[in-house]
Image (tube, helix red, strand yellow):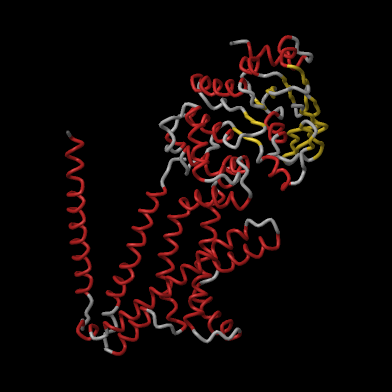
Amino acid sequence: MRLEASVVTKHYGAHAALDGASFSTGDAARVIALLGPSGGGKSTLLRVLGSLLVPDSGGIRIDSRTLPHDEAGALIERRANGFVFQGYNLFPHLTALQNITLPLREVHGMADAQATQRALELLHRLGLEGHEHKRPSQLSGGQQQRAAIARALAPKPRLLLLDEPTSALDPVMTGEVLDVIRELAEAGQSIILATHEISFAKKVADWVVFLAAGKVAESAPAADFFTQPQTQLAQQYLEGLSKYR
Amino acid sequence: MPESSASTTAPLRRTFYTLGLFALLSATFYAVFSAVDYQWNWAGAWKYRQQFGIGWLTTLGISLVAMVVSVVLGFVLMLGRRAPWEPLRMLCSGVVELVRGSPLLVQLLIGHYIIAKAVNISEPVVTGIILLGIFEGAYLAEIFRGAVESISASQLEAARAVGFSKVQTYRFVIIPQALRRALPGTTGQLVSLIKDSSLLSVIGIEELVQKVKIMGTASYTPLEGYLPLAIAYLIVTLPLSYLARRLEGRFAYET
Protein backbone atom coordinates (compact mmCIF):
# COMPACT_ATOMS: atom_id res chain seq x y z
CA MET A 1 0.00 0.00 0.00
CA ARG A 2 1.22 3.48 -0.80
CA LEU A 3 0.09 6.40 1.38
CA GLU A 4 0.46 9.96 0.23
CA ALA A 5 -0.48 13.15 2.08
CA SER A 6 -0.06 16.57 0.56
CA VAL A 7 -0.17 19.73 2.73
CA VAL A 8 -2.89 18.41 5.02
CA THR A 9 -4.23 20.87 7.59
CA LYS A 10 -6.78 20.35 10.34
CA HIS A 11 -7.73 22.99 12.90
CA TYR A 12 -9.55 22.67 16.22
CA GLY A 13 -10.67 26.22 16.78
CA ALA A 14 -7.51 28.30 16.52
CA HIS A 15 -5.22 25.34 17.21
CA ALA A 16 -3.70 23.68 14.15
CA ALA A 17 -3.42 19.95 14.95
CA LEU A 18 -2.10 19.35 11.45
CA ASP A 19 -0.28 22.28 9.90
CA GLY A 20 0.59 21.35 6.35
CA ALA A 21 1.63 17.72 6.82
CA SER A 22 3.08 16.08 3.71
CA PHE A 23 4.69 12.69 3.20
CA SER A 24 4.61 9.66 1.01
CA THR A 25 5.50 6.08 1.77
CA GLY A 26 7.03 3.44 -0.45
CA ASP A 27 4.73 1.33 -2.63
CA ALA A 28 4.88 -1.71 -0.37
CA ALA A 29 4.35 -0.16 3.08
CA ARG A 30 2.02 -2.38 5.08
CA VAL A 31 2.56 -1.60 8.77
CA ILE A 32 3.03 2.13 9.17
CA ALA A 33 3.99 3.59 12.55
CA LEU A 34 3.14 7.21 13.37
CA LEU A 35 5.68 8.39 15.92
CA GLY A 36 6.42 11.69 17.58
CA PRO A 37 5.92 13.71 20.75
CA SER A 38 2.45 14.07 22.29
CA GLY A 39 0.45 16.86 20.71
CA GLY A 40 2.46 16.52 17.51
CA GLY A 41 -0.56 15.50 15.41
CA LYS A 42 -0.30 11.68 15.39
CA SER A 43 -3.90 11.08 16.48
CA THR A 44 -5.30 13.66 14.10
CA LEU A 45 -3.31 12.32 11.13
CA LEU A 46 -4.46 8.78 11.99
CA ARG A 47 -8.09 9.93 11.98
CA VAL A 48 -7.65 11.77 8.70
CA LEU A 49 -5.99 8.74 7.07
CA GLY A 50 -8.91 6.57 8.27
CA SER A 51 -11.54 9.06 7.01
CA LEU A 52 -12.80 9.52 10.54
CA LEU A 53 -11.97 13.21 10.14
CA VAL A 54 -12.14 15.26 6.98
CA PRO A 55 -9.16 17.65 6.67
CA ASP A 56 -9.67 21.40 6.28
CA SER A 57 -7.41 21.38 3.25
CA GLY A 58 -4.90 19.18 1.48
CA GLY A 59 -5.39 15.70 0.11
CA ILE A 60 -4.77 12.07 0.95
CA ARG A 61 -4.16 9.32 -1.59
CA ILE A 62 -4.13 5.63 -0.73
CA ASP A 63 -2.63 3.73 -3.67
CA SER A 64 -4.46 5.35 -6.58
CA ARG A 65 -7.57 6.47 -4.67
CA THR A 66 -8.11 9.99 -3.38
CA LEU A 67 -10.02 10.16 -0.07
CA PRO A 68 -13.34 12.04 -0.28
CA HIS A 69 -13.73 15.39 1.49
CA ASP A 70 -17.50 15.23 2.06
CA GLU A 71 -19.08 13.62 5.12
CA ALA A 72 -21.18 11.13 3.12
CA GLY A 73 -18.18 9.94 1.13
CA ALA A 74 -16.05 9.77 4.28
CA LEU A 75 -18.69 7.56 5.96
CA ILE A 76 -18.53 5.03 3.11
CA GLU A 77 -14.73 5.16 3.16
CA ARG A 78 -14.42 4.70 6.93
CA ARG A 79 -16.82 1.75 6.91
CA ALA A 80 -14.06 -0.15 5.11
CA ASN A 81 -11.62 0.61 7.95
CA GLY A 82 -11.29 -0.65 11.53
CA PHE A 83 -10.39 1.61 14.47
CA VAL A 84 -9.10 1.04 17.98
CA PHE A 85 -8.43 3.98 20.32
CA GLN A 86 -6.76 4.44 23.69
CA GLY A 87 -9.69 3.08 25.62
CA TYR A 88 -13.35 3.48 26.50
CA ASN A 89 -14.41 2.82 22.92
CA LEU A 90 -16.52 -0.29 23.52
CA PHE A 91 -20.21 0.40 24.06
CA PRO A 92 -20.76 -0.07 27.82
CA HIS A 93 -24.41 -1.12 27.53
CA LEU A 94 -23.60 -4.08 25.25
CA THR A 95 -21.74 -7.33 25.88
CA ALA A 96 -18.43 -8.05 24.16
CA LEU A 97 -20.29 -10.21 21.64
CA GLN A 98 -22.98 -7.60 20.95
CA ASN A 99 -20.32 -4.92 20.54
CA ILE A 100 -19.06 -6.88 17.55
CA THR A 101 -22.31 -8.20 16.07
CA LEU A 102 -24.23 -4.88 16.16
CA PRO A 103 -22.04 -3.07 13.60
CA LEU A 104 -21.77 -6.26 11.51
CA ARG A 105 -25.54 -6.44 11.24
CA GLU A 106 -26.44 -2.75 11.05
CA VAL A 107 -23.51 -1.36 9.06
CA HIS A 108 -22.37 -4.32 7.00
CA GLY A 109 -25.75 -5.99 6.51
CA MET A 110 -24.67 -9.38 7.80
CA ALA A 111 -27.27 -11.92 8.91
CA ASP A 112 -27.60 -12.52 12.64
CA ALA A 113 -26.24 -16.08 12.72
CA GLN A 114 -23.35 -15.20 10.44
CA ALA A 115 -22.43 -12.15 12.51
CA THR A 116 -22.48 -14.16 15.74
CA GLN A 117 -20.31 -16.84 14.18
CA ARG A 118 -17.78 -14.29 12.95
CA ALA A 119 -17.73 -12.52 16.35
CA LEU A 120 -17.22 -15.75 18.31
CA GLU A 121 -14.46 -16.83 15.97
CA LEU A 122 -12.60 -13.55 16.56
CA LEU A 123 -13.17 -13.46 20.33
CA HIS A 124 -11.77 -16.97 20.61
CA ARG A 125 -8.83 -16.14 18.38
CA LEU A 126 -7.98 -13.15 20.58
CA GLY A 127 -8.17 -15.22 23.75
CA LEU A 128 -11.53 -14.03 25.04
CA GLU A 129 -13.23 -17.40 25.27
CA GLY A 130 -15.62 -17.38 28.23
CA HIS A 131 -15.92 -13.58 28.19
CA GLU A 132 -18.35 -13.29 25.26
CA HIS A 133 -21.34 -12.29 27.37
CA LYS A 134 -19.58 -9.88 29.71
CA ARG A 135 -20.06 -6.15 29.58
CA PRO A 136 -16.92 -3.98 29.17
CA SER A 137 -16.97 -3.05 32.86
CA GLN A 138 -16.55 -6.72 33.73
CA LEU A 139 -13.43 -7.07 31.56
CA SER A 140 -9.87 -6.00 32.36
CA GLY A 141 -8.31 -3.17 30.39
CA GLY A 142 -6.35 -5.60 28.23
CA GLN A 143 -9.43 -7.72 27.56
CA GLN A 144 -11.38 -4.59 26.64
CA GLN A 145 -8.72 -3.58 24.12
CA ARG A 146 -8.64 -7.08 22.64
CA ALA A 147 -12.43 -7.02 22.33
CA ALA A 148 -12.10 -3.61 20.65
CA ILE A 149 -9.58 -5.07 18.24
CA ALA A 150 -11.96 -7.96 17.55
CA ARG A 151 -14.72 -5.46 16.77
CA ALA A 152 -12.43 -3.52 14.42
CA LEU A 153 -11.35 -6.72 12.64
CA ALA A 154 -14.81 -8.25 12.31
CA PRO A 155 -15.80 -6.68 8.98
CA LYS A 156 -12.37 -7.61 7.50
CA PRO A 157 -11.13 -4.03 7.19
CA ARG A 158 -8.87 -2.88 4.37
CA LEU A 159 -6.93 -0.87 6.93
CA LEU A 160 -6.67 -1.29 10.71
CA LEU A 161 -5.99 2.01 12.50
CA LEU A 162 -4.70 1.87 16.08
CA ASP A 163 -4.37 5.07 18.12
CA GLU A 164 -2.09 4.43 21.11
CA PRO A 165 -4.00 1.23 21.89
CA THR A 166 -1.88 0.41 24.96
CA SER A 167 -1.28 3.81 26.55
CA ALA A 168 -3.99 3.26 29.18
CA LEU A 169 -2.77 -0.23 30.10
CA ASP A 170 -0.28 -1.60 32.61
CA PRO A 171 2.84 -3.43 31.28
CA VAL A 172 1.30 -6.93 31.49
CA MET A 173 -1.85 -5.94 29.61
CA THR A 174 0.25 -3.92 27.17
CA GLY A 175 2.13 -7.14 26.39
CA GLU A 176 -1.13 -9.03 25.77
CA VAL A 177 -2.39 -6.43 23.35
CA LEU A 178 0.91 -5.96 21.53
CA ASP A 179 1.11 -9.75 21.01
CA VAL A 180 -2.24 -9.61 19.25
CA ILE A 181 -1.23 -6.67 17.06
CA ARG A 182 2.05 -8.38 16.15
CA GLU A 183 0.21 -11.53 15.09
CA LEU A 184 -2.10 -9.46 12.91
CA ALA A 185 0.84 -7.68 11.33
CA GLU A 186 2.57 -10.97 10.62
CA ALA A 187 -0.63 -12.39 9.15
CA GLY A 188 -0.62 -9.67 6.53
CA GLN A 189 -3.10 -7.09 7.89
CA SER A 190 -2.47 -3.51 6.73
CA ILE A 191 -2.01 -1.40 9.86
CA ILE A 192 -1.48 2.24 10.74
CA LEU A 193 -0.34 2.54 14.34
CA ALA A 194 0.19 5.68 16.43
CA THR A 195 2.26 4.73 19.44
CA HIS A 196 4.93 5.58 21.98
CA GLU A 197 6.06 1.94 22.18
CA ILE A 198 9.27 2.42 20.23
CA SER A 199 10.69 -1.07 20.65
CA PHE A 200 7.38 -2.54 19.48
CA ALA A 201 7.27 -0.23 16.47
CA LYS A 202 10.81 -1.31 15.68
CA LYS A 203 9.67 -4.95 15.59
CA VAL A 204 6.52 -4.67 13.48
CA ALA A 205 6.63 -1.49 11.41
CA ASP A 206 8.03 -1.35 7.91
CA TRP A 207 7.55 2.39 7.48
CA VAL A 208 7.75 5.27 9.98
CA VAL A 209 6.16 8.71 9.76
CA PHE A 210 7.58 11.04 12.40
CA LEU A 211 5.42 14.04 13.32
CA ALA A 212 6.12 17.12 15.39
CA ALA A 213 4.10 20.32 15.77
CA GLY A 214 1.56 19.29 13.14
CA LYS A 215 4.13 18.69 10.43
CA VAL A 216 5.82 15.55 9.14
CA ALA A 217 9.48 15.86 10.13
CA GLU A 218 10.54 12.54 8.65
CA SER A 219 9.08 9.72 6.58
CA ALA A 220 11.33 6.74 5.99
CA PRO A 221 11.55 2.93 5.89
CA ALA A 222 11.54 1.69 9.50
CA ALA A 223 14.97 0.14 9.22
CA ASP A 224 16.51 3.45 8.14
CA PHE A 225 14.57 5.56 10.64
CA PHE A 226 15.59 3.57 13.68
CA THR A 227 19.25 3.17 12.72
CA GLN A 228 19.94 6.63 11.33
CA PRO A 229 17.21 9.23 11.93
CA GLN A 230 17.82 12.25 9.70
CA THR A 231 16.44 15.06 11.84
CA GLN A 232 17.72 16.18 15.23
CA LEU A 233 14.15 16.12 16.54
CA ALA A 234 13.78 12.41 15.75
CA GLN A 235 17.20 11.63 17.22
CA GLN A 236 16.30 13.35 20.50
CA TYR A 237 12.92 11.64 20.57
CA LEU A 238 14.39 8.18 20.08
CA GLU A 239 17.12 8.77 22.65
CA GLY A 240 14.63 10.11 25.18
CA LEU A 241 12.35 7.12 24.80
CA SER A 242 15.04 4.45 24.88
CA LYS A 243 16.86 5.94 27.90
CA TYR A 244 15.18 3.70 30.46
CA ARG A 245 14.32 0.65 28.37
CA MET B 1 -22.04 -15.92 60.52
CA PRO B 2 -22.91 -12.25 61.14
CA GLU B 3 -23.62 -11.85 57.43
CA SER B 4 -26.15 -14.66 57.25
CA SER B 5 -27.98 -13.45 60.34
CA ALA B 6 -28.02 -9.91 58.95
CA SER B 7 -29.62 -11.08 55.71
CA THR B 8 -32.43 -12.87 57.55
CA THR B 9 -33.13 -10.09 60.06
CA ALA B 10 -32.94 -7.19 57.58
CA PRO B 11 -36.47 -7.70 56.12
CA LEU B 12 -37.87 -8.27 59.59
CA ARG B 13 -36.28 -5.10 60.86
CA ARG B 14 -37.60 -3.13 57.91
CA THR B 15 -41.12 -4.42 58.51
CA PHE B 16 -40.84 -3.44 62.14
CA TYR B 17 -39.66 0.08 61.27
CA THR B 18 -42.41 0.44 58.65
CA LEU B 19 -45.10 -0.48 61.15
CA GLY B 20 -43.62 1.86 63.75
CA LEU B 21 -43.46 4.80 61.33
CA PHE B 22 -47.00 4.09 60.11
CA ALA B 23 -48.30 4.08 63.69
CA LEU B 24 -46.52 7.37 64.38
CA LEU B 25 -47.95 8.94 61.22
CA SER B 26 -51.47 7.77 62.06
CA ALA B 27 -51.21 9.15 65.59
CA THR B 28 -50.02 12.52 64.25
CA PHE B 29 -52.85 12.67 61.72
CA TYR B 30 -55.36 11.69 64.37
CA ALA B 31 -54.09 14.38 66.74
CA VAL B 32 -54.19 17.04 64.03
CA PHE B 33 -57.64 16.10 62.79
CA SER B 34 -59.17 15.91 66.25
CA ALA B 35 -57.69 19.32 67.11
CA VAL B 36 -59.76 20.86 64.29
CA ASP B 37 -63.26 21.62 65.51
CA TYR B 38 -65.17 20.02 62.66
CA GLN B 39 -68.09 17.66 62.45
CA TRP B 40 -66.88 14.86 60.16
CA ASN B 41 -69.66 13.42 58.02
CA TRP B 42 -68.17 10.40 56.26
CA ALA B 43 -71.58 8.91 55.49
CA GLY B 44 -72.43 11.98 53.40
CA ALA B 45 -69.22 11.65 51.42
CA TRP B 46 -69.58 7.88 50.95
CA LYS B 47 -72.73 8.39 48.90
CA TYR B 48 -70.67 10.01 46.17
CA ARG B 49 -68.15 7.17 45.85
CA GLN B 50 -69.21 6.41 42.30
CA GLN B 51 -68.61 10.00 41.17
CA PHE B 52 -65.26 9.83 42.97
CA GLY B 53 -64.37 6.71 40.98
CA ILE B 54 -65.34 8.34 37.69
CA GLY B 55 -63.21 11.35 38.56
CA TRP B 56 -60.27 9.11 39.39
CA LEU B 57 -60.55 7.24 36.09
CA THR B 58 -60.79 10.56 34.24
CA THR B 59 -57.59 11.76 35.92
CA LEU B 60 -55.88 8.50 35.00
CA GLY B 61 -57.04 8.62 31.39
CA ILE B 62 -56.06 12.25 30.87
CA SER B 63 -52.69 11.70 32.55
CA LEU B 64 -51.92 8.65 30.46
CA VAL B 65 -52.62 10.37 27.14
CA ALA B 66 -50.82 13.54 28.30
CA MET B 67 -47.79 11.41 29.24
CA VAL B 68 -47.56 10.05 25.71
CA VAL B 69 -47.92 13.58 24.31
CA SER B 70 -45.28 14.97 26.70
CA VAL B 71 -42.71 12.22 26.07
CA VAL B 72 -43.05 12.56 22.28
CA LEU B 73 -42.95 16.36 22.45
CA GLY B 74 -40.04 16.32 24.91
CA PHE B 75 -38.08 14.10 22.52
CA VAL B 76 -38.87 16.30 19.51
CA LEU B 77 -37.94 19.50 21.40
CA MET B 78 -34.68 17.88 22.56
CA LEU B 79 -33.79 16.95 18.98
CA GLY B 80 -34.78 20.45 17.86
CA ARG B 81 -32.48 22.07 20.40
CA ARG B 82 -29.61 19.98 19.00
CA ALA B 83 -30.49 20.58 15.35
CA PRO B 84 -27.84 21.97 13.00
CA TRP B 85 -30.24 24.65 11.64
CA GLU B 86 -30.11 27.69 13.92
CA PRO B 87 -33.70 29.01 13.54
CA LEU B 88 -35.04 25.59 14.56
CA ARG B 89 -32.72 25.54 17.58
CA MET B 90 -33.91 29.02 18.56
CA LEU B 91 -37.56 28.08 18.12
CA CYS B 92 -37.30 24.99 20.30
CA SER B 93 -35.26 26.77 22.97
CA GLY B 94 -37.83 29.58 22.95
CA VAL B 95 -40.74 27.19 23.39
CA VAL B 96 -39.00 25.40 26.27
CA GLU B 97 -38.15 28.64 28.08
CA LEU B 98 -41.58 30.21 27.59
CA VAL B 99 -43.46 27.13 28.73
CA ARG B 100 -41.20 26.49 31.72
CA GLY B 101 -41.16 30.14 32.69
CA SER B 102 -44.90 30.69 33.10
CA PRO B 103 -47.40 29.02 35.48
CA LEU B 104 -49.44 26.10 34.17
CA LEU B 105 -52.57 27.78 35.53
CA VAL B 106 -52.01 30.80 33.29
CA GLN B 107 -51.26 28.59 30.28
CA LEU B 108 -54.48 26.66 30.88
CA LEU B 109 -56.59 29.81 31.11
CA ILE B 110 -55.08 31.44 28.02
CA GLY B 111 -55.07 28.15 26.13
CA HIS B 112 -58.67 27.32 26.95
CA TYR B 113 -60.35 30.71 26.76
CA ILE B 114 -58.38 32.24 23.91
CA ILE B 115 -56.36 29.79 21.80
CA ALA B 116 -58.80 26.84 21.87
CA LYS B 117 -61.62 29.21 20.99
CA ALA B 118 -59.63 30.67 18.11
CA VAL B 119 -58.83 27.27 16.60
CA ASN B 120 -62.28 25.84 17.38
CA ILE B 121 -61.46 23.08 19.84
CA SER B 122 -64.72 22.75 21.73
CA GLU B 123 -63.78 19.79 23.92
CA PRO B 124 -61.96 21.02 27.06
CA VAL B 125 -60.51 17.52 27.62
CA VAL B 126 -58.63 17.79 24.32
CA THR B 127 -57.33 21.27 25.18
CA GLY B 128 -56.38 20.07 28.64
CA ILE B 129 -54.44 17.07 27.42
CA ILE B 130 -52.56 19.13 24.83
CA LEU B 131 -51.68 21.90 27.28
CA LEU B 132 -50.61 19.50 30.01
CA GLY B 133 -48.56 17.53 27.48
CA ILE B 134 -46.82 20.69 26.28
CA PHE B 135 -46.11 21.89 29.82
CA GLU B 136 -44.53 18.64 31.00
CA GLY B 137 -42.92 18.04 27.59
CA ALA B 138 -40.88 21.24 27.96
CA TYR B 139 -39.43 19.93 31.23
CA LEU B 140 -38.84 16.47 29.74
CA ALA B 141 -36.97 18.06 26.81
CA GLU B 142 -34.41 19.45 29.25
CA ILE B 143 -34.14 16.16 31.13
CA PHE B 144 -33.60 14.32 27.82
CA ARG B 145 -31.10 16.92 26.61
CA GLY B 146 -29.06 16.61 29.78
CA ALA B 147 -28.98 12.83 29.41
CA VAL B 148 -28.01 12.94 25.73
CA GLU B 149 -25.30 15.55 26.29
CA SER B 150 -23.80 13.46 29.08
CA ILE B 151 -22.80 10.75 26.58
CA SER B 152 -19.04 11.11 26.28
CA ALA B 153 -17.22 12.27 23.16
CA SER B 154 -15.29 8.98 23.06
CA GLN B 155 -18.58 7.07 22.72
CA LEU B 156 -19.65 9.30 19.84
CA GLU B 157 -16.29 8.79 18.17
CA ALA B 158 -16.56 5.02 18.68
CA ALA B 159 -19.97 5.14 16.99
CA ARG B 160 -18.51 7.01 14.03
CA ALA B 161 -15.56 4.62 13.94
CA VAL B 162 -17.72 1.50 13.57
CA GLY B 163 -19.45 3.25 10.69
CA PHE B 164 -22.76 4.26 12.23
CA SER B 165 -24.68 7.04 10.50
CA LYS B 166 -26.16 9.86 12.57
CA VAL B 167 -29.51 8.08 12.91
CA GLN B 168 -27.82 4.78 13.81
CA THR B 169 -25.68 6.58 16.41
CA TYR B 170 -28.82 7.90 18.10
CA ARG B 171 -30.59 4.57 17.87
CA PHE B 172 -27.85 2.20 19.00
CA VAL B 173 -25.52 4.32 21.14
CA ILE B 174 -27.02 7.59 22.41
CA ILE B 175 -30.59 6.64 23.22
CA PRO B 176 -29.90 3.32 25.01
CA GLN B 177 -27.30 4.99 27.23
CA ALA B 178 -29.23 8.23 27.71
CA LEU B 179 -32.42 6.34 28.59
CA ARG B 180 -30.97 5.06 31.81
CA ARG B 181 -29.62 8.46 32.80
CA ALA B 182 -32.92 10.16 31.99
CA LEU B 183 -35.06 7.64 33.86
CA PRO B 184 -35.01 9.12 37.40
CA GLY B 185 -35.76 12.64 36.18
CA THR B 186 -38.41 11.42 33.78
CA THR B 187 -40.26 9.48 36.47
CA GLY B 188 -40.30 12.52 38.71
CA GLN B 189 -41.72 14.58 35.86
CA LEU B 190 -44.44 12.01 35.07
CA VAL B 191 -45.44 11.93 38.74
CA SER B 192 -45.65 15.74 38.57
CA LEU B 193 -47.82 15.41 35.46
CA ILE B 194 -50.36 13.27 37.32
CA LYS B 195 -50.49 15.77 40.16
CA ASP B 196 -50.58 18.79 37.83
CA SER B 197 -53.61 17.31 36.06
CA SER B 198 -55.57 18.51 39.11
CA LEU B 199 -55.27 22.06 37.71
CA LEU B 200 -57.41 21.05 34.73
CA SER B 201 -60.42 21.62 37.02
CA VAL B 202 -60.08 25.35 36.25
CA ILE B 203 -61.11 24.79 32.64
CA GLY B 204 -64.14 22.77 33.64
CA ILE B 205 -62.85 19.24 33.26
CA GLU B 206 -64.46 16.98 35.85
CA GLU B 207 -61.35 15.13 36.93
CA LEU B 208 -60.78 13.93 40.46
CA VAL B 209 -60.26 17.28 42.21
CA GLN B 210 -63.23 18.86 40.47
CA LYS B 211 -65.41 15.86 41.36
CA VAL B 212 -64.40 16.13 45.02
CA LYS B 213 -65.25 19.84 45.03
CA ILE B 214 -68.68 19.17 43.51
CA MET B 215 -69.24 16.31 45.92
CA GLY B 216 -68.30 18.45 48.91
CA THR B 217 -70.72 21.18 47.96
CA ALA B 218 -73.58 18.82 47.19
CA SER B 219 -73.37 16.78 50.36
CA TYR B 220 -72.21 19.50 52.78
CA THR B 221 -68.94 17.62 53.28
CA PRO B 222 -66.40 20.29 52.28
CA LEU B 223 -63.37 18.51 53.81
CA GLU B 224 -64.13 14.78 53.77
CA GLY B 225 -63.19 14.28 50.16
CA TYR B 226 -59.61 15.52 50.47
CA LEU B 227 -58.18 12.56 52.40
CA PRO B 228 -59.40 9.95 49.89
CA LEU B 229 -58.23 12.38 47.20
CA ALA B 230 -54.64 12.30 48.48
CA ILE B 231 -54.77 8.51 48.74
CA ALA B 232 -56.18 8.17 45.24
CA TYR B 233 -53.20 10.10 43.81
CA LEU B 234 -50.71 8.07 45.86
CA ILE B 235 -52.23 4.81 44.57
CA VAL B 236 -50.97 5.82 41.11
CA THR B 237 -47.81 7.78 41.86
CA LEU B 238 -46.14 5.40 44.33
CA PRO B 239 -46.27 2.34 42.02
CA LEU B 240 -44.96 4.53 39.19
CA SER B 241 -41.90 5.48 41.25
CA TYR B 242 -41.44 1.84 42.25
CA LEU B 243 -41.66 0.67 38.65
CA ALA B 244 -39.06 3.24 37.61
CA ARG B 245 -36.63 2.06 40.30
CA ARG B 246 -37.06 -1.51 39.06
CA LEU B 247 -36.35 -0.38 35.50
CA GLU B 248 -33.27 1.54 36.60
CA GLY B 249 -31.99 -1.65 38.17
CA ARG B 250 -32.54 -3.53 34.94
CA PHE B 251 -30.66 -0.96 32.85
CA ALA B 252 -27.85 -0.69 35.38
CA TYR B 253 -24.30 -1.25 34.14
CA GLU B 254 -21.00 0.31 35.10
CA THR B 255 -19.59 2.85 32.71
Residue appearing at x 79%, y 36% in the figure: A65
Residue A91 showing in the rendered view: no
Q: Say above or below: B89 vs B64.
A: above
Q: Is residue A132 visible?
A: yes
Residue A68 shown left or right of residue B23 in the figure:
right
In front of the other: A6 or B81: A6
**Residue at point 62%, 14% (across, down):** A199
What residue is rendered at 59% in x and 50% in y? Answer: B168
| Quadrant position of the C terminus of chain A in the picture | top right
Q: Is residue B16 above or below residue A118?
A: below
Q: Residue A107: image x %, image y %?
A: 60, 45
Quarter of the N terminus of chain A within the rendering? top right
Q: Is residue A10 left or right of residue B251?
A: right
At 78% from the left and 34% from the top, the residue drawn is A60
Q: Position of residue B171 (x, y in %)?
A: 55, 52
Residue B186 in the image: above or below residue B159 = below
Could you tell me how many numbered marks the image carries? 0
Residue B83: quarter of image: bottom right
Find residue B141 and report its horizontal and vertical position in percent: 54, 60
Residue B21 spot, x, y in % from top left: 21, 58
Location of residue B39 by image quarter: bottom left
Report whether B20 appears left or right of B115.
left
Q: Is residue B174 above or below residue A52?
A: below
The foreground one among B113 and B140 is B140
